[in-house]
Amino acid sequence: HYTFFPGSPRWPDSKRDLTYAFWPGNNLTTEAKSVFTRAFDRWSTVIPMTFAETDSFTIADIRIGFFSGDHGDGEPFDGVLGTLAHAFSPPSGRFHLDGDENWVVSGDISDSSIISAVDLESVAVHEIGHLLGLGHSSVEDAIMYPTIPSRTRKVELAQDDIDGVQQLY
Ligand code: TQI
Ligand code: ZN
Ligand code: ZN
């Protein structure tokens, strides 16, 4: 079953159209950015919210960046595997990914010869759940389940994820 963060924080009713921006220093490819667009779209099809990219990192509601090791927020990343990413409860919008992971942006992750490959879209869909206010779920099929088998792609919202996010919005 789905959970919320303590106090059930959520984006206010006045914030239904959120913007997101990529940390300029990362210089992400169009292909990598499109993975995040797809991940946002999976959530926006089930709740009355929209997500649009903005070029202004300073005004964006959600700020996405890849960082390695200590990146100044007291929650350092740990190199390959372990922690893959973290996102904070509303209305933080802070969405960080571990720059040391072997991220798979396109193609079939099960075909990857890299044993530590991690599917970017799977992690993005999970972290956006946190950004919207969902905690972890006890339902194994749910995107918000706290673990994922290695080299797995899991991007489809389960009914449990939908029920949880629709209770918030
Ligand atoms: N990062 C953890 C996560 O997002 C960070 C975390 C731990 C956390 N406890 C939390 C966040 C409690 C909110 C509330 O869950 S992670 C997965 C999964 C991670 C793990 O790097 O371990 C995914 C990130 F589910 F696959 F294990 C994304 Cl998809
Ligand atoms: Zn961080
Ligand atoms: Zn999580």
Image (cartoon, helix red, strand yellow):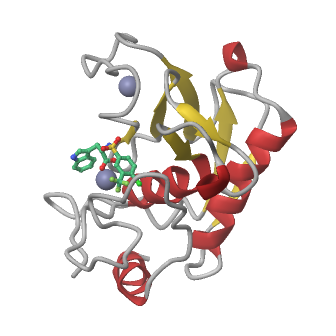
Asked if residue 169 is positioned above or below residue 12 in the image, the reply reads: below
Q: Position of residue 169 (x, y in %)?
A: 44, 77
Give the farthest residue toward the left: 6
Give the farthest residue toward the right: 30
Asked if residue 160 is positioned above or below residue 34 in the image, the reply reads: below
Q: Is residue 47 left or right of residue 137?
A: right
Q: Quadrant of residue 51?
A: bottom right
Asked if residue 57 is positioned above or below residue 35 in the image, the reply reads: above
Asked if residue 92 is positioned above or below residue 59 in the image, the reply reads: below
Q: Position of residue 19 (x, y in %)?
A: 66, 47
Q: Is residue 61 left or right of residue 69?
A: right
Question: 111 or 149: which is nearer to us?
Answer: 111
Give the farthest residue toward the front: 113
Q: Position of residue 110 (x, y in %)?
A: 59, 57
Q: Position of residue 166 (x, y in %)?
A: 42, 83
For image coordinates 39% across by 78% down, the residue present is 161
Q: Is residue 146 left or right of residue 86?
A: left
For image coordinates 48% across by 32% down, the residue present is 97
Q: How many marks?
A: 0
Q: Quadrant of the N terminus?
A: bottom left
Q: Quadrant of residue 61?
A: top right
For image coordinates 41% across by 26% down, the residue present is 80
For image coordinates 30% across by 18% down, the residue present is 76
